[in-house]
Each structure stands twice: as C-alpha cells, then as structure tokens.
Image (tube, rainbow, N blue to C red):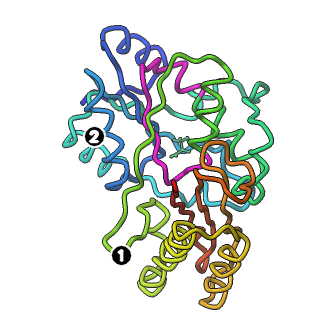
Amino acid sequence: MEIIRTVAEMRAWRKQAGKLAFVPTMGNLHEGHLKLVAAARARAEKVVVSIFVNRLQFGQGEDFDAYPRTFDADCAKLAAAGVDALFFPTERELYPRVRQDFNVEPPHIQDELCGAFRPGHFRGVATVVTKLFNIVQPDLACFGKKDYQQLHVIQAMIADLNSPIEIVPVDTGRAADGLALSSRNGYLSAEERAEAPRLYRNLSMIRDGLLSGSQDYAALENAAREDLAAAGWTVDYVEVRQADTLEIAHAGEKRLVALAAARLGKTRLIDNIEVFR
Ligand code: PAF
C-alpha cells in the first residue's frame, strides 16, 4: 500500500489508477470501515482510503483533540484489506491558507437532527469531502449508512452540483448485540458499553411499530425517548423522517427512517434504521 501525503502526489497517482473507488475516513478504523473498503474493492480496479481528522467539522468543546489517532494500526488493517493507496495529508496540506473563506454550504437540513446539536458540522463535512473529491478524483466513493444525515448531505451535494462521482451507501456494521460500530464506542466504559445497545433496541421497536402499521410517529418517538432517559441517557433526538429526503414524515409515508442521537455519559452515539413498508 502506498502512503501519499501531498496533494500533488495524490493527483499524479490518480492519473494511472484506472477505475478508482474512494473511502474517506478520520482513521481509528474498525470493521465498519472495512465494510466500506470491501464495497469499494468490489466496484473498482483501485481503492484509495483517506485518513484526515477534519477540524472544520468539530464544534467548540467537541472531541477534536481527543479523537483517537491510530495511524500504525490503521495502516496494518488497510494493507491487509488490499487497499492500494492511503492518502494521509497534514492539515496544512489540505487547508493551505490560514483562513478557509470558501465553504460548501448545505441546505436547511444542516440545521436539523444532528445539525441542530452540532452547528456547522455538515458545512465542515461537505467542505472537506469536496476538497478530498477534488484531490482524489474518484469514480465512486463509499459512505456508511450509520451517518445517515451525512450520507444524505453528500448525495444532495453531488446531485445539486452535477458531480460525476457515484456515491455508494453501505449498510451499518453492527456488533453482535446490535450496537452500531463507531470510533466513538472506544470512549465507553465497560458499564456504558453494556448499556449502549439500548439505542438500537429502541430504534428496532420503532421499526416494528411502523411495520405493524402505526402512523403515530410521535408516540413511537416519545416511547423511545422516555426509555432512554429513564436509563440515564441524555437524548438529543429520536425522530421518524422520510428516508429519501430526511424531511418531516407524514402519516401514510412508505419509505421511512428512524434516527436517534443520545449521550451515554460523555459519549454521543447515533444510529438509525430504514423502514420500507
Ligand atoms: O464520516 C467520517 O468519517 C467523516 O465525516 C468524513 C466523511 C471522513 C469527512 O471528514
């Protein structure tokens, strides 16, 4: 696996790569990332992964400094997974000017769901993904459904800006007890880790309610919020939305997604389940 640190080298490497699949990450890789790599591998001649902890998408008081940097372990996993190149730029390489004046501004959805609790987060994501796309110039890029709102923002950006890059959504990797795989699971104490699957269990109950015909989304959301709060979680949101647009869901909707974000101790966990009925 080649390790590429500069924009110029990345562009030169890309020229000889043929059909290229891209997996952008912030490192601290787990099985969920390797599922993205496998999806990329199956669709292209060459696979490039990036590792870059993007300051722009972290808010004040969030975990930018504490975010785990595990470069050597990540490299071993990527090499074993057959990745052809790792793009590992410095902050200065990706943000060459002191100020970042031009940003990619997502539409109103950036202020809802996770965006309501993480102001500026999706602007930071859309901006860095655009920069990475401009540098790597892949034919396709794989994103996990665990970050459902992020996936939606990227898909909308690609469509609205007529980008030629195909976005491949990849199902969420889960532990045996249902917990969605996430780099932030590493922050959980043993006790919190045992409690964490409650988030998925509540989303599963919402799914079951929707599949059995319930149109009372608010009742399903409230039951989940109450169960989480009673178990000591701080709930940011539990919402049933339209799966394709993430707009408010009305009764009778067929393609839905139940999304939740809640804090267990200091760790913020997110998850979602699509429900097509
Ligand atoms: O999902 C992530 O790890 C990040 O948000 C991404 C897409 C790599 C952009 O920094």
Which residue is identified by label 1? 177
203 with respect to 223 (left or right):
left
* Residue at the spot 64% in from the left edge and 32% down from the top edge: 156
Q: Which is more toward the observer, 250 or 51?
A: 250
Residue 148 lies in the magenta stretch = yes
186 with respect to 160 (left or right):
left
In the rendered image of this protein, does residue 77 appear above or below residue 173? Answer: above
Which stretch is magenta? 130-149
Which corner quadrant of the image does residue 182 belong to?
Answer: bottom left
Q: Earlier in the sequence, mark 1 or mark 2?
A: 2
* Residue at the spot 46% in from the left edge and 14% down from the top edge: 8
The residue most toward the bottom is 230
Say which element carries label 2.
helix
79 with respect to 223 (left or right):
left
Crowding at label 1, few (<14), some or many (≥20) Cα neighbours within 10 Å?
Answer: few
Residue 269 lies in the magenta stretch = no
Which residue is identified by label 2? 38
Quick check: is the Cβ at mark 2 less than 8 Å away from ligand 1? no
* Residue at the spot 73% in from the left edge and 72% down from the top edge: 218
Residue 217 at what x, y percent from top left?
A: 69, 68
Which amino acid does the dot numbered 1 rest on?
Answer: Asp
Say which element carries label 1.
loop
Residue 185 at what x, y percent from top left?
A: 46, 68
Which amino acid does the dot numbered 2 rest on?
Answer: Ala
Which corner quadrant of the image does residue 13 belong to?
Answer: top left
